[in-house]
């Protein structure tokens, strides 16, 4: 089974997505992304060649976990607060 080396995790309740890099010894946190531009910058800093293509292109290097790709905003609460 193939796993992409970069994981953009599910959207947090406060918004944004944790980005991690899979390594031979586990996962390394790259940061909390609130946009594709953040993910691209994290990958650039990690030395990923052509980070724009990795995020916006074919997707072979990036796995979008649980939520839609390129989405970063949390859903608003579904109940009214008192």
Image (spheres, rainbow, N blue to C red):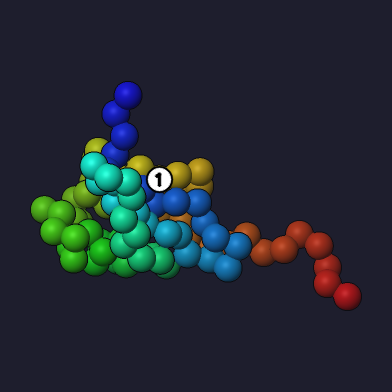
Please identify the quarter of the rendering in which residue 60 is found: top left
Give the residue displayed 26% in from the left and 64% down from the top.
Answer: 42
Please identify the quarter of the rendering in which residue 39 is found: bottom left
Residue furthest to the bottom: 82
In front of the other: 34 or 19: 19
Q: Quadrant of the N terminus?
A: top left
Establish if 5 lies above or below 16: above
Residue furthest to the top: 1
Give the residue displayed 34% in from the left and 59% down from the top.
Answer: 29
Residue furthest to the front: 25
Q: Name the residue under label 1.
A: 64
Judge left or right: residue 43 versus residue 32.
left
Give the residue displayed 31% in from the left and 34% down from the top.
Answer: 3
Give the residue displayed 31% in from the left and 55% down from the top.
Answer: 28
Spot occupied by residue 6 in the image (x, y as percentages of width and height): 30, 48
Please identify the quarter of the rendering in which residue 12 is found: bottom right
Q: Answer whether residue 36 is visible to the viewer in this image.
A: no
Marker count (numbered): 1
* Mark 1 residue crowding within 10 angstroms, few (<14) / some (14–19) / many (20+): some
Q: Quadrant of the C terminus?
A: bottom right
Q: Answer whether residue 11 is visible to the viewer in this image.
A: yes
Judge left or right: residue 45 versus residue 38.
left
What SS does tag 1 mark? Answer: strand
Spot occupied by residue 30 in the image (x, y as percentages of width and height): 31, 62
Spot occupied by residue 38 in the image (x, y as percentages of width and height): 32, 67
Judge left or right: residue 17 versus residue 53.
right
């Amino acid at each position: 089974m193939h796993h992409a080396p970069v994981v953009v995790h599910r959207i947090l309740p406060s918004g944004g997505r944790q980005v991690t890099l899979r390594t031979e010894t586990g996962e390394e946190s790259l940061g909390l992304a609130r946009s594709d531009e953040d993910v691209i910058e994290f990958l650039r800093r990690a030395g990923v060649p052509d980070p724009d293509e990795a995020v916006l292109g074919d997707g072979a290097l990036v796995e979008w976990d649980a939520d839609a790709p390129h989405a970063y905003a949390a859903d608003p609460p579904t109940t009214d607060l008192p």
